[in-house]
Image (cartoon, grey):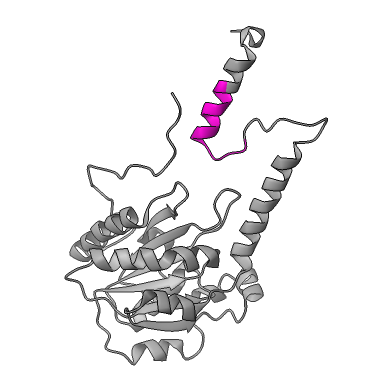
Amino acid sequence: MSDDLVTPSARAALWDRLRAASPARLALGRVGHAPPLGAVLAFQLDHARARDAVHAPLDSGALADELAPLPTIVVTSAAGDRATYLRRPDLGRALAAGCAEQLACGQGGYDVAIVIGDGLSATGVQTGAPRLVHSLIGELQGLTVAPIVIATGARVALGDPIGEALRARATVMVIGERPGLTVADSLGIYLTFSPRSGRADSERNCISNIHANGGLSAQHAASLLARLLREALRRGLSGVDLKDDADVLPAPDTKRIPE
């Protein structure tokens, strides 16, 4: 059908449906040769939120308080500060001097070690990790869980030396995901069986896009992780050979598209 035959109201209704289906910036319009001022300001605000999420420091003390009464241990990576962390991903995968000994002096020999890492969104960790971890603990009845480890300057692979030091059968890394221009506070979960330094990414299972703004809810993510973890412990593996075979997937927490 020619575009000339589409009425303005029908065209507007179509764009309304598409906007409801996606957080993408669609049909913003223009003022002269530029986008409308409101759209420009909204873009700049989202960009600022994404930058803040990357650069903001994690308040480990406040996070530990929100995790109470769960016991916590605070460690750092070998990246001494945020600027170094962003420039040197390799240092974010290694523990700072003395941290491995700090972890090894405890009981050890757990089924699972849960690590909370700031990653690339300390904002997401600060606001979403406590609820997610409490949901995880509720799903792991019958398993021995190490004290919750809060790690700053953390990349995903930092969970490997942490789990190794705790002598855990599996590590669950809850970490802030790289922010985008629609979501700056998303979390990811990475499951690794038999954690040790040098594990490949293909040996991990990932659950991503966990956030309250249309993403996977904390409870759905915890239920999915619990199924994967129990199967990983039963079969002695994780990664590409471990799939979630649940028949029912959680409903997406998104807005309904108008009829």
> Which quarter shows the C terminus?
top left
Seen as rendered, the residue at the extreme right is 32
Where's residue 218, x and y in %?
Answer: 36, 57
Check the image and report above or below for 247 versus 82: above
The residue at 24%/74% (across/down) is 111
What stretch of residues is rendered in magenta? 13-25
Residue sitting nearer the eye, 84 or 147: 147
Check the image and report above or below for 138 versus 64: above
Where's residue 85, x and y in %?
Answer: 60, 73
Quadrant of residue 192 in the image?
bottom left
Residue sitting nearer the eye, 120 or 220: 220
The residue at 50%/62% (across/down) is 124
Quadrant of residue 69 in the image?
bottom left
Left or right of residue 216: residue 78: right
The residue at 75%/31% (across/down) is 30
Left or right of residue 194: residue 46: right
Check the image and report above or below for 103 versus 200: below
Residue 21 included in the magenta stretch of the image: yes
Residue sitting nearer the eye, 50 or 226: 50
Where's residue 83, x and y in %?
Answer: 66, 73
Check the image and report above or below for 129 versus 50: below
Quadrant of residue 168 in the image?
bottom left
Identify the main secondary structure in magenta: helix
The residue at 33%/42% (across/down) is 251
Left or right of residue 238: residue 162: right
Residue 209 included in the magenta stretch of the image: no
Where's residue 116, x and y in %?
Answer: 42, 71
- Residue 5 in view of the camera: yes
Residue sitting nearer the eye, 259 or 23: 259
- Residue 196 in view of the camera: no
Tag count: 0
> Which quarter shows the N terminus?
top right
